[in-house]
Amino acid sequence: MTGQSERVKAIVLRRTNYAEADRVLQLLTPKGRRSVIAKGVRRERSKLAGGIELFAICDVVIRSGRGDLGLLTSARLSAFYRHILEDYDRMQFAYSVMKLVSAASENIDEPEWYYVLSQVLEQLNNPAINQKLIETWFYLQYASLLGDELNLRTDVTTAPLLPDKKYMYDNAEKGLRLAEQGDLGADAIKLLRLIQAKPLANVAQIGGITEVINDCWLTARQHAAV
């Protein structure tokens, strides 16, 4: 039914200029993706412009239209993660995450994408949080939402992972393989399990990860194939 409105939190995935002063926005919300048009938003005195920034949580009101394109009638910033813009590496990773989530959510439109992206942006905004820890968490969540959760209980032969053995990631089998010279020992596997199972805010509190985070990051990145 046209003319109905919904108020929802949203993350701007993409902004495309349209006509003389409008923008078409791709939004990610706790209810799934939304495509909206922001009328006159490129005009100097637009009340909408300041509420649809990238790297932010926006509080928006969307009025339904006749097709899939809604009309943005109200927008304000709920949280703006400005510190991401102050660090080139974090900013580039944030753009990369938004691009991956945008593409994935077109095919799998699940509310979980919003929660993954919002957690990544929030933690990237804190320069004290290890960036590779954030990236490792994202890659594992990304793979899981695509239906390809990393098996951290058994190896590629279905044998249980043993605490006194070393493992490597097998790209062909997309799992862990027993290897005498492997980089993944008990500490790395334990950390991967925690990262995969817990919210990012909890994971960010884990200390003593310096010696194993690089191996965890590489494994998660290989598994996510990004």
Image (cartoon, helix red, strand yellow):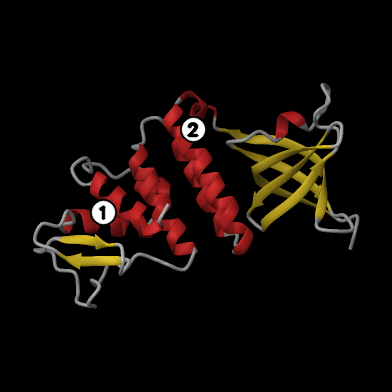
Q: Is residue 217 above or below residue 168?
A: above
The image position of residue 223, as x and y in percent, is 36, 59
Residue at the image point whose x is 29% and y is 49% from the top? 218
Amino acid at the residue labelled 2 = Met
Judging by the rendered image, the residue that carries numbered circle 1 is 191
Residue at the far front in the pictured view: 172
Does residue 114 lie above or below 109 as drawn? above
Is 166 positioned to the left or the right of 74 in the image? left
The answer to whether residue 194 is left or right of residue 93 is left
As drawn, is 22 to the left or to the right of 171? right
Can you give x and y, in whole percent of width and height, for residue 160 in the image?
A: 19, 74
Disc 2 residue crowd, few under 14, some 14–19, many 20+, Cα 10 Å: some
Instruction: Give the answer, above or below, for where 126 lies relative to 3.
Output: above
Residue appearing at x 43%, y 60% in the figure: 143
SS at badge 2: helix
Q: Is residue 92 left or right of residue 220?
A: right
Residue of label 2 = 91
Residue 103 appearing in the image: yes
Q: Amino acid at mark 1?
A: Leu
